[in-house]
Image (spheres, rainbow, N blue to C red):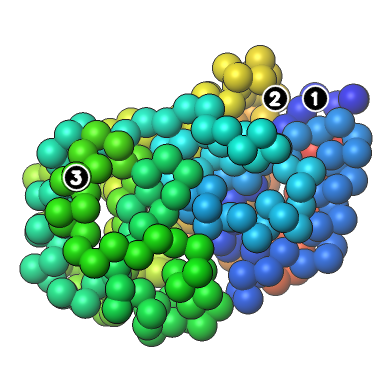
Amino acid sequence: MTGKYKLIALDMDGTLLNQNKEITETCQEAVREACRAGKEVVFCSGRSPSELREYLEILPEVNYVIGASGGVLYHAGQQKLLCKHSFEPGLLGELVKRLSRVNKEAVFVCVAGIQAYTTPPHCFHISDYLGAACQELFSNSMIHVMDMEPFVRWKSGMVEKFSAYFRTWEEWEAAKELLRDLEPKMAVATTGVRDIECTPLGVTKALGLQDLSRYLDVPVEEMIMVGDSENDLAALKAAGLSLAMENGIPEAKEIADSVVPDNEHNGAAYAIRHYLMKG
């Protein structure tokens, strides 16, 4: 294995996945080429491992998942949870209670270990929030719980990420305001789709890179991070080489070492072939 960089961590939504939530054939082949060359390609996502199952089946060469925005580190080949960072007990019950005031039809998702949980019936209409491409994900890859507030209280101390999705930006702004005094206790970000993504304080995708660095004994300086949104910023700052997608937010492109083509034009494949394989 030659080259400075041993590993590339790819954000999923907005990066490896196109607008139809697909990994194109071009990106699939680039991942396989890298793995055949002895490089590690890592899924680095806000999603839980359970939400990435179909992509891991398409690309069984991918061994590692940094999931829940750094909350979990998962070995896909061994189907083993390697590391997790959970909320302090008691915090999430208050969080759900407050967010429910904004809109009782908001869609809630929590990640505990490798599994994601969501609330029907509103999750059956997630296409109204995120578009039709996400409907199957929420309907089929998550476990449904009838009432999120008692569920997270029951799972107290075992949840690594909590997300809420709103119909309007006005609702999103109201929800952010309700959480302002809780922000010293947790990290709050967005992926740009009227969502609020909460992880334990200090837990970001950068922490996920550090966890993987210790597990593989590969310095973070020898890792590439590719991303597009707010929850990628910490990892973009931490990685040895940071690449932002052309479709990414301005903040991502400002801090990145370089910008690659957008997710509709195989930017992830470009990152692999021009930086991981040649770096």
- Identify which residue is drawn at 85% across, 52% down: 30
Q: Which residue is mark 1?
A: 4
Q: Which sits in the foreground, 18 or 222?
A: 18
Q: Nearer the viewer, residue 183 or 247?
A: 183
Q: Alpha-carbon distance for marks 3 and 1?
A: 46 Å
Image quadrant occupied by the N terminus? top right
Amino acid on which disc 1 is placed: Lys
**Left of 164 or right of it: where is 8?**
right
Look at the picture and state if 97 lies above or below 18.
Answer: above
Is disc 3 placed on a helix, strand or loop? Answer: helix
Label 2, label 1: how far apart the Cα atoms are: 6 Å
- Assess disc 3: are there few (<14), some (14-19) or many (≥20) residues with their C-alpha within 10 Å of its C-alpha: few
Crowd band around label 1 with a 10 angstrom C-alpha radius: few (<14), some (14–19), many (20+):
some
Element assignment for label 2: helix
Which residue does the numbered mark 2 point to in the structure image? 222
Q: Find residue 199 and report its horizontal and vertical position in percent.
A: 32, 42
Residue 238: which disc?
Answer: none
Q: Residue 110 vs residue 57: left or right?
A: left
User: Residue at horizontal 35%, vertical 40%?
Assistant: 160
Residue sitting nearer the eye, 98 or 80: 80
From the image, state whether disc 3 or disc 2 is nearer to you. Answer: 3
